[in-house]
Amino acid sequence: MSRAVRGLALGVALLVAACGSTVPLARRNAGAGSTGAADELSGTPAGQGATADEAAQASAASGTAATGSTAKGSQASGRSGSGGASSSTGGKTALKVQGVTDTEIRVGYGTQQDADQSAGGFGLNAVFGDQEAQARAVVDDINKRGGVLGHKLSLVFHDDKTANDNANPDVTATAQCQDWTRDRPVFAGINVVGDRNRDSFFSCMAKAHTPALYSDLATHSLNELTKYAPYLYAPGEAMLERFVPTWIDRLNAMGYFTGWDTATGGAGPAPVKVGVPYTDDDNGRRYFDVVKKALAGIGRKADDSFAFNADTSALAQIPQVVLRFRSNGITHVLLPASAYLVTPVAERQGYRPRYGMTTIDGLSSLTLTTSPAAQLHGVLGVGWFPASDVDAAHDPGDVSPYETRCKKDMADAGQATTDRLTLTVQLINCDLFFMLADSLTRAGEISPTALQQGAVSLGASFPSAFTFAERFGPGRYDGASAARDLAYDDGCACFRYRDAVNRPFAG
């Protein structure tokens, strides 16, 4: 399922859109202006904008007129939360930049404060923690260390209810963008609410020349980052074009494609037949194409597929795909996301295929708590996020000094946790804020262009707070770059990494 569950998706893609959005495809794209945004952003190459051009960008974001190489602050237009100020960094006089004053950098942060309660309504014991407190914890740490180039980070929270995100995510996503670009202008917005990480949000932020950083452990395509560069960044995210080839290759190397009995959920004489569910939208079809190409590379094919109709609730379609695959003799199901919604339905139908899974399934943080053990026997896959992949007893240890630092930040703020899902969200938050701060610090300047240049310069040096390896570079604004083999272990009824080898992603 290429587009993982959205709705409650704070750090992980969680409920209600299972394999795609619950809103019609036409409505998701309406008003997003994706073509216009692409055309608008293509005029000046990233990192080459002249001074006047950048001033014009800041002006466009705040709705004020540019004069020469500077733009008036947004207070001139009567809006609250002005963000325009010039500053001197490294001997250079910076332009007036939205969301930046002489002393602070305003950063938007999206929340879904009722997520825990809403998850309970779906029968999930999902605890995301205090979202605002988590964001404050990491920002307070950055500020105590001197902030970013002498500026303190200042948070601008934007909350909406889970029900609203589920009912019409384009509306809530656009409202969040307008809050941060028009009502309370920020320098950049950070969003981990999965349902708002969509074209309408990305397009709106890019048109306002306001950088957006996101992560939600859903399947995203490189097309998004390319379309909205250099205003969209995905630290820690594994783009489908990168992880899918590695995933399929590793499944093959681990002996996944062997005979299987879908009645007993174990080895059997039935020939291997591969089923691939995906969402019938641009991103989903891209995922399906990449899977087919990867399967062909190992001499296999997709024997059956199911395109989830984005015009109806994906949850209601899960029984349909289970029945179809069972009836067509599908023995192996490639399920890189949303397993925690599919496996209970499959068990009720007495269908126990062999699943191929990934980090995006929320393996230890979600799948284990919802899936009957019989559904998990034989599961193989790849994972790049220990806090979400494995339980505490099988955690390989902090992936970097930034993970250690993040845990201390949370403990100091009274947010220490043993819950793997809560920890997942906390580490994602740290990764996003640390990457923003490190990129600007490297650039030695505060502007959207400087952020892009700083991100590119990080290369493979950024010490991710949650994943084994991240790599940035020219035209590469996504982070996760390697995964480890993993498997379900019947002995401990848990997921475990099979070794400590980091397998690089494609590209």
Image (cartoon, rainbow, N blue to C red):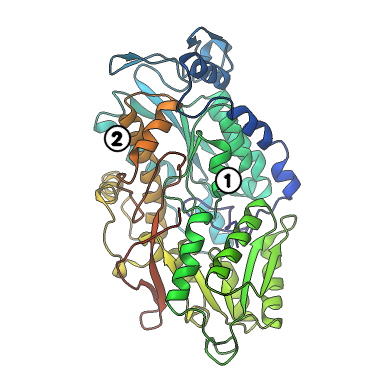
Residue 298 screen position, x and y as percent: 52, 72
* Residues tagged 2 and 1 counted as in contact (Cβ below 8 A): no
- Classify mark 2: residues with Cα within 10 Å, few (<14), some (14-19) or many (20+): some
Give the foreground label among 2 and 1.
1
Please identify the residue farthest to the top as the structure is shown: 67
Give the side of residue 19 with respect to residue 23, left or right.
left
- Residue at 40% x, 13% y is 86
Query: Judging from the image, what secondary structure is the residue with disc 1 in?
Result: helix
Residue 455 screen position, x and y as percent: 39, 36
Asked if one can make out residue 109 in the rendered structure from this viewpoint, the answer is no
Residue 236 screen position, x and y as percent: 41, 49
- Classify mark 1: residues with Cα within 10 Å, few (<14), some (14-19) or many (20+): some
Asked if one can make out residue 8 in the rendered structure from this viewpoint, the answer is yes
Q: What residue does disc 2 label?
A: 142
Which numbered disc, 2 or 1, marks the residue that appears first in the sequence? Answer: 2
User: The disc labelled 2 sits on which kind of residue?
Assistant: Ile
Give the side of residue 296 with respect to residue 328, left or right.
left
Q: What residue does disc 1 label?
A: 223
- Residue at 62% x, 27% y is 40
The quadrant of the image that shows the N terminus is: bottom right
Give the side of residue 60 with respect to residue 217, left or right.
right
Question: Number of marks in the image?
Answer: 2
User: Could you tell me how far apart the alpha carbons at marks 2 and 1 are, in whole angstroms?
Assistant: 32 Å
Which of these two is toward me, 275 or 429?
A: 275
Number of the label disc, if any, that sits on residue 36: none
Residue 182 screen position, x and y as percent: 58, 24
- Against 466, residue 33 (above or below) is above
- Residue at 39% x, 25% y is 105
- Against 146, residue 420 (above or below) is below
- Against 191, residue 270 (above or below) is below
User: The disc labelled 1 sits on which kind of residue?
Assistant: Asn
Which of these two is toward me, 264 or 315?
A: 264
